[in-house]
Amino acid sequence: MKITIDIDDNLLQDAMNLTGERKKGPAVVKAATEYIKREMSKKFGHMLREGEFGDYPLTNAEIEALDR
């Protein structure tokens, strides 16, 4: 899907440098994709630590208590 957005030139250049992309569009897509993956990983880790999965028997606090 194509969209039109306004991005600060310096921010866009940083995205291009950090992603290694030479074109603007692929740099924005890669940066957004990596951000989403990172946030989803954080959310999954939080869910694991809080025991939100029925088949995972212990919370993070319970696991840490066993280590002591």
Image (cartoon, rainbow, N blue to C red):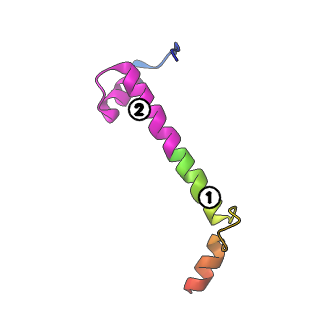
Residue at 41% x, 32% y is 30
Pointer 1 or 2: first along the chain: 2
> In the rendered structure, which segment of residues is drawn in magenta?
12-37
Q: Is residue 2 left or right of residue 49?
A: left
Q: Amino acid at mark 2?
A: Lys
Disc 1 packing (10 Å; few <14; some 14–19; many ≥20): few
Q: Residue 12: horizontal and vertical position, in percent? A: 39, 23
Q: Residue 18: horizontal and vertical position, in percent? A: 33, 35
Give SS at disc 2: helix
In this figure, which residue is indicated by the disc labeled 2? 30
Residue at 37% x, 20% y is 24
Instruction: Decide: is 56 above or below 22.
Output: below
In this figure, which residue is indicated by the disc labeled 1? 46
Mark 1 near mark 2, Cβ–Cβ under 8 Å? no
Q: Is residue 24 magenta?
A: yes
Q: Is residue 49 left or right of residue 9?
A: right
